[in-house]
Image: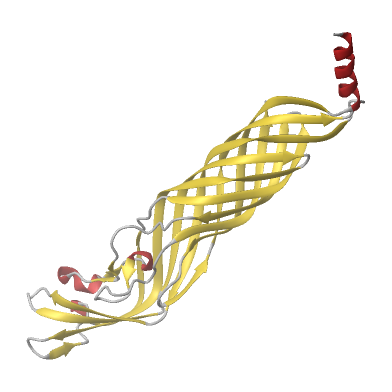
Amino acid sequence: MKKLIVTIAIIVATGSLLSAQAINEFSVYGGGGLSSLNYQLSQGNGSSGFGGDFGAGYTYLRFVNRAVETGTVVYQQMWGIHVGMGLGIYNATAKLNNVEAITSNLIDSENDGFDLLSKLSGYNETQTVMFLTIPVMGQYNIEQFYVMGGIKTGIPLNGKYKSKDATLTNEAYYPKYENWMKTQTFAGYGAFNGKTFDGDLDLGVSFMLSFEAGMNWNLGGNLVLYSGAYFDYGLNDISKGDKQKFINYTANNAENFTTNSVLTSYSDGSKSTAFTDKVNTMAVGIKLRLAFRK
């Protein structure tokens, strides 16, 4: 028995000593950078926008010291899981080429049938979406360096689109009279300059692959500051439902026509071509996280 005890004592004295304990971190975070809706337009070009991610979180960590026989710490390791809740803001802009669409078999206020030819130019649409973000990520620390990876769920809270200074020209062909109407602005026909269009966006839940890496700094006491870069990429298409007509014509209010967003519309009246095939989220930027350890 004495030999066994002596042997264990020698191994501990000359080898590495492991000591582990649990750490709870309560944190607030904020980050920003390129934060956009990612899509390709069939007619025109889309560009990314800037946004951010802000919220609070909780991290459960296991802390390990690795030491030599003198008790001097060689390095520290932590691994655990991080969960949180925040607000993600995403922005994007769509710039359309000149769009021409024919919508057939419409009925005007006099109950006459007609075909509507619409030509749109100078259309630039901005989209802004806010998501409730819920990250579930693994975290690993070694000394001052850390990495995180996992899944982030984005639940849409609010979405808006807006375009201004567009020029729309409407012309109507009446088969019954074999005649074109081009200048009757009271009926919605003619050239309309400087039009502003806006409305709500109805988008679905986004499931994002999320990654973060950087360094952590002990601020004294129980406060730790994490600073790093993050990358989120949406795995699924968040556009939902059937596509709609791009230009809305209402017979009883013909001069006040509206447009739907390019994210949810067909580029022509026959519904053969959508402006976008799919929409997903993407973000890359810098993040700071202030944590209180207990």
Q: Residue furthest top?
A: 1
Q: Is residue 242 above or below residue 118?
A: above
**The N terminus sits in image quarter:** top right
Q: Is residue 54 above or below residue 284?
A: above
Counting from the top left corner in percent of width and height, residue 179 is at 13, 90
Q: Is residue 246 above or below residue 193?
A: above
For residue 121, what is the image quadrant? bottom left
Counting from the top left corner in percent of width and height, residue 287 is at 64, 49
Q: Is residue 109 above or below residue 88?
A: below
Q: Is residue 192 visible?
A: no
**The C terminus sits in image quarter:** top right
Q: Nearer the viewer, residue 144 or 179?
A: 144
Q: Is residue 103 visible?
A: yes
For residue 195, what is the image quadrant? bottom left
For residue 140, what is the image quadrant? top right
- Residue sitting at x 15%, y 69%: 252
Left/right of residue 278 with respect to residue 242 in the rendered view: right
Picture colour scheme: secondary structure
- Residue sitting at x 24%, y 76%: 270
Counting from the top left corner in percent of width and height, residue 205 is at 41, 50
- Residue sitting at x 67%, y 27%: 23
Counting from the top left corner in percent of width and height, residue 279 is at 43, 62
- Residue sitting at x 53%, y 66%: 48
Left/right of residue 234 with respect to residue 149 in the rendered view: left
